[in-house]
Image (cartoon, grey):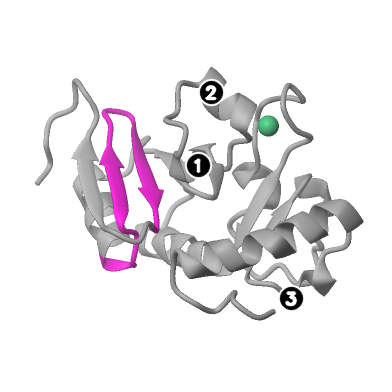
Amino acid sequence: MRGCGRAYPTRILACLQEIRSFESTGVGHGGKLRLMLYSSHRLVSRAGWRWPHFRPDELACRCGGRGCRGAYWHDADFLDALEALRAEMGRPLRINSGHRCAIWNAVVGGVPNSQHRRIAVDIAFGKHDRRAMVDAAERLGFTGIGIARSFLHLDRRETPARWTYPGTEDLS
Ligand SMILES: [Zn+2]
């Protein structure tokens, strides 16, 4: 679809029209778009899914029906980077938070223009080496990197940013 191959923010603005059209029709262009908002992760076709270590429900909104039906923001480039990070780390990545609908984003205290309103992930550090995960994420094209004590926030924003959450030691 026209517009979807362009860099931010044009890509987002162009695709919002398609997203609106998608929401009104409930039809997903055959799953061929690289960027698309699904009203529910259950609508994502398994046929075109090529990221073996992740599922749409892991990346979908977890408001439990308060604001949406498990909305899912599909971004193939984001998934490619996430899958590459999984390969690099060699063990499962547990997603604490992915896409958030407006209601859920407010409930969990996200800023109104949070990258989670599109797609961002908070990955539990668990037993992973924190510095190794941060370094790999940066190398693999994540540009928004937020380091917390127990999780790593990752997104692919236009202007790179890196921060530590309060109470977290700086790894850099
Ligand atoms: Zn929701």
Residue 32 in the image: above or below residue 70 = below
Callout 3: few (<14), some (14-19), or many (20+) C-alpha neighbours within 10 Å? few
Viewer-proximal residue among 138 and 6: 6
**Residue drawn 29% across the image and 48% down it:** 145
- Residue 30 percent coordinates (x, y): 83, 73
Q: Residue beneath label 1, please?
A: 116
Disc 2 C-beta below 8 A from ligand 1: no
Viewer-proximal residue among 118 and 89: 118
Numbered disc in front, either 2 or 1: 2
The numbered disc on residue 32 is 3
- Residue 157 percent coordinates (x, y): 37, 57
The quarter of the rendering in which ligand 1 is drawn is top right
Q: Residue beneath label 2, please?
A: 106
**Residue drawn 65% across the image and 36% down it:** 61
Residue 105 in view? yes
Magenta region: which residues?
A: 139-156
Instruction: Give the mark, 3 or 1, whose residue is nearer the N terminus.
Output: 3
The numbered disc on residue 73 is none
**Residue drawn 66% across the image and 70% down it:** 50
Callout 2: few (<14), some (14-19), or many (20+) C-alpha neighbours within 10 Å? few
Viewer-proximal residue among 18 and 107: 18
Q: Could you say whether the residue bearing mark 2 is in a helix, strand or loop?
A: helix
